[in-house]
Image (cartoon, helix red, strand yellow):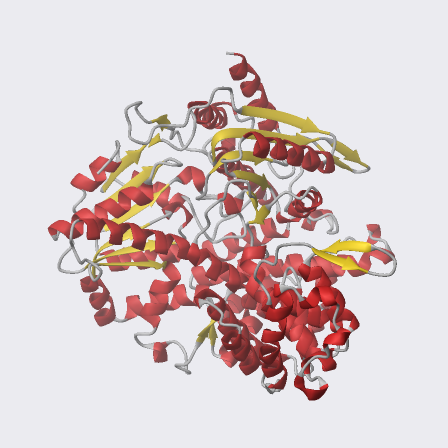
Amino acid sequence: MGLRKGQKELVERYRGGKCAIAAIPGGGKTHCLSLWAVEMITHGYHKPGKILIVTYMNSAVNNFKQRISAELQKRGINGSKDYFVSTIHGLCLQIIKEKPDLIIANEEFEVIDEVSKIHLISSAIDEWKRYNEREFQLYLDMENLSVSKMGDVYKSWHEKLCRIMLSAISDFKVKGITPSEAKERCKSLGRDSILAWASDIYEIYDRRLKIGGYLDFDDMLYNAKKMLETDEHLLEKYRKKYTFVCEDEAQDSNYIQNEILTLIANGNLLRVGDSNQAICGSFSSSDFTLFKNFCEAPDTTVYSITQSSRNTREIIDLANFFVKYVRESHPVHECRDSLLPQYIEPVPEDDPRPNPVIDEYGIKAAVFESWEDEARGVVTQTIHMIKNHPDKTIAILVPTAWKMSLVVNILEARKVPFELLDNTSGERNKTLKKLGRIIDFLAVPEDGEKFSNMINECILTGDYDGPVFVDSEDETRTMGQRELLSEFIKKYPVEKILYPVGGIIETSDVPKELLKTKIWRDFTDSLDTVRQLLEFPNTVVEKLILFIAEKLRFDREERAIAQKVAGDVRYLMNQNPRWRLSDLAFELLSPKNMFNYFAGVVWDLKGFEPKPGVVTVATYHKSKGLEWDIVFLTGLNNADFPVLLDDRFMGEFWFLKEQYKNPQALIKSEMAKVFEGKIVKDSVLESKLETISERARLLYVGITRAKEYLFLSSYEQNKGKRVELPSKYFFELRRYIEEAGKT
């Protein structure tokens, strides 16, 4: 079966009880867990029930299913009914649907995604502000803010508050605190308390959920747990259904998820994770100590997977050096346990999948004079690597999403193929853009440019190669087929194209060069479809969207996105009666539109496979679980990767008063005081320690994404009051790289 140390012990020995798999990056935990499930099913050890595997991403669900199914087929076993793979939210939805009347009056409830949740919370904040404008302004540093910037500051503060409230409401729900309980417990707090604000906004948000018959993801967890705890028959049903419960990515678990799986498992609980890759951050309700404590429990059997074939030995050595540095030499003693002493071992030389070997020391580090210089330098080096290694996959990782734009602009300017790994990427967003272009045209059908955009991006999506030679009175030009067609469409009245006199476009009006092309023949053949789209009633927009999906023959993933958009549009039209087709088109075509989240979920179902010659651009967080041959780790500065307590911290907002600079820290300390009876002496200090620890783990994740080549970069610049310096981590890693590269 090709099992290594740690993997072999699990597959051959684990047959029940509490068990933990502590795995290092690239350790093959999915492979190992899949083979364990196959072994259990092959010998019937799982009976009388099934094996339940809970993981985080939809793509991981598919990966597990494919691996287990393929191995069972090799053995000639039809074991499809012997296991079930799901996300935690999928499992909770299954539980809730057993008795939906227990939690919500309307059985036809709808689960809203994170984007819809953000919009509801944002509107709840707007409602709260109408009666609490003074409180909203209370945190703002009015004395040092210019009048000209107030508009932008108000907007920014609203956006930041929305994220903070999103986190606070999630914490309330994960802890099982109802809106009425939150209000009651927060009564004693002053009106300058951000937790008191959160209790108010929580109440408004909850009311809006109930009016709409909605549940959010946290509701699903809370209600599933409540149902299992209060209904003995339901709990017994799930315990009989699943003999074994396995949790993947257990380092990212939270309290309520932990409770649900423990209840169902009834003692047979297998948890797999890597505490050193716990990177969910301060705005998440996840708690990586849950997995750590589970591993340390006296009744837990622990198997360690320590061997990895992903990286070169040089990159493994760098990752191990970083773990050792943090644990033994971190200047802030409280952060030395940010990383556990889990060191990566290369596989034996005779392993069927050995560690990659290259002819040079493939790790470098560089400092630039600004982020702009760094982005340009990294792209230049990326182009060099593509030329020298055309068969290799490449990624550029950035610390925050806003830094992506400059990298993307430079890649576009230098015509480097790339894939943006976020919910606004071309692949993820193509269906939304297609719907946007069509609706944009239907809103103003006489606009030739909108007509041309729709035709080229939505209707005629094939390749039209071969230049066209165009003779005119002034010159002879060479044009592409698309360019020639677009030029004609924009100049010629749309009505005459779609509804010509006699039913046929007058050929004398069409450039003779265009008439000879394949694109013209396909264009005229497509006009009947365009006419059907125009003639379909657009008063019921959700039906129009589904009709577009049907006429353009959307594939399965595209249809799923179209159905989701249609459902959301119905909600949006009810909330915004003045919305028109043009408003919907504008939203769909916006890079950060409200439908991106679901499109990203659908895209994730297919999984992501890096392609040689196509540069992946992603945040460090988005890179988790992925790997590339060549990786550029950018932006290693003291704000994004703080090490010292006097470093710059991203959670501190410049437009707030000094005592309110870090509202997330304040709300966490108030939450601990009111609901747990804990006194946090210095909330800002606690927040800084948490951030430093999380960022150490984030950098560790970044280092271990690279298989063969790794480039680290930072910048140093001084812009007035803003001084940005390389992180101390960068200097320590660069020193190690320079010494190791010489040997």
In front: 23, or 159? 23
Indicate the position of residue 551 as horizontal and vertical percent values.
52, 77
* In-image side of 119 versus 369 (left or right): left
The residue lying toward the viewer, choosing from 257 and 108, is 108
Position of 71 compared to 524: left or right?
A: left
Q: Where is residue 657 in the image (x, y as percent from the top left)?
A: 74, 50
Q: In which quarter of the image is residue 432?
A: bottom right
Q: Residue at x 58, y 70 (%)?
A: 120
The relative height of residue 392 versus residue 196 in the rendered view (above or below) is: above
- Work out whether 175 lies above or below 223: above
The percent position of residue 257, horizontal first and vertical second, equals 37, 57
Horizontal side of 344 relative to 33 (left or right) equals right
Report the label total: 0
Q: Which residue lies furthest to the top in this view?
A: 743
Quadrant of the snapshot with the N terminus: top left
- Residue lying at 58% horizontally and 78% vertically, measured from the top left: 529
Q: Is residue 563 visible to us here?
A: yes
Give whichever of 592, 225 is nearer the camera: 592
Q: Is residue 188 visible?
A: no
Q: In this view, does 603 lie to the left or right of 715?
A: left
**Where is residue 465 shown, x and y percent of the image?**
62, 55
Residue at x-position 65% and y-position 31%: 714
- The vertical placement of 24 against 544, above or below, is above
